[in-house]
Image (cartoon, rainbow, N blue to C red):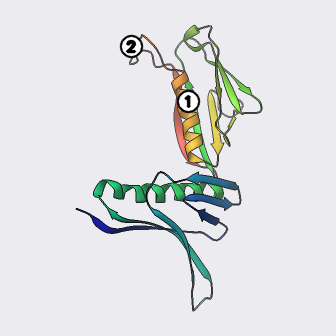
């Protein structure tokens, strides 16, 4: 069955500016600029502006439309809308993820590289290998030993980059050739929230 029109709207808050040109979306806010390319999706993205008669305030929104779509193609509309919402949240408040170092016997040693642009993991399960992970663009790693021991804080505007950097760190400390129910050593995400 084909659906004639599938449509989703994302309201644009006051301090946010959004530009759309040939499916390339640019979101500008107090914390910076985020860009995303949606050329892979066969849908229309437009910024609509509407003037309210009573308050004479301009209200704007991003509309995402897909014409003549099957049920499985329709889900792209919600996915694109959710990504634009995440971009708006990112440039207004930002994202902050916390990761905990878990170990039973060998303490994991972590060094920050280039003012939080990457990390170096040593002594994982007593191994001599030094694992180096570079952060994706716009992500900064901080560590406050005085307040919280064995906790890394990753922050940035782009939710995709912050969560992917967490995934890279987590995957670098995967336990190989052992029972993972018994060997729980690693670096795990403990908290995800908006950085206000």
Mark found first going from the N terminus, 1 or 2: 1
Q: Residue furthest right?
A: 115
Q: Count of labels shown?
A: 2
Q: Residue at x 54, y 59 (%)?
A: 23
In the image: residue 79, left or right of residue 86: left
Task: Using the image as rendered, state which of residue 165 and residue 3 is in the foreground.
Answer: 3
Do the residues bearing badges 1 and 2 touch, measured as CB atoms within 8 Å? no
Q: Which residue is mark 1?
A: 168
Q: Which-is-in-front pick, marks 1 and 2?
A: 1
Q: CA distance from mark 1 to mark 2?
A: 21 Å
Q: Which mark is residue 191?
A: none
Q: Secondary structure at mark 1?
A: helix
Q: Residue at x 22, y 62 (%)?
A: 1
Note whether 195 is above or below 8 in the view shown. above
Task: Using the image as rendered, state which of residue 188 and residue 73 is in the foreground.
Answer: 73
Q: Which residue is mark 2?
A: 179
Q: Residue at x 62, y 84 (%)?
A: 57
Note whether 78 is above or below 7 in the view shown. above
Mark 2, Cα crowd under 10 Å, few <14 / some 14-19 / many 20+, is: few
In the image: residue 77, left or right of residue 128: left
Whole-percent x, y for residue 163 in the image: 55, 40
* Quadrant position of residue 69: bottom left
């Amino acid at each position: 069955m084909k659906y004639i029109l599938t449509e989703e709207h994302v309201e644009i808050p006051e301090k946010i500016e959004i530009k759309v040109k040939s499916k390339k979306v640019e979101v500008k806010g107090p914390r910076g600029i985020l860009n995303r390319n949606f050329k892979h999706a066969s849908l229309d993205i437009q910024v609509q502006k509407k003037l309210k008669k009573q308050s004479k305030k301009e209200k704007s929104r991003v509309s995402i439309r897909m014409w003549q779509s099957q049920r499985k193609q329709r889900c792209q509309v919600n996915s694109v809308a959710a990504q634009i919402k995440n971009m708006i949240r990112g440039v207004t408040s930002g994202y902050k993820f916390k990761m905990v170092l878990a170990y039973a016997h060998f303490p994991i040693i972590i060094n920050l590289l280039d003012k939080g642009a990457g990390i170096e993991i040593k002594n994982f399960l007593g191994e001599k290998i030094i694992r180096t992970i570079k952060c994706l663009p716009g992500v900064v790693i901080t560590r406050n030993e005085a307040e919280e021991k064995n906790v890394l804080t990753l922050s940035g505007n782009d939710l995709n980059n912050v969560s992917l950097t967490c995934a890279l760190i987590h995957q670098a400390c995967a336990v190989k050739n052992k029972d993972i129910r018994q060997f729980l050593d690693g670096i795990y995400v403990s908290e995800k929230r908006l950085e206000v």
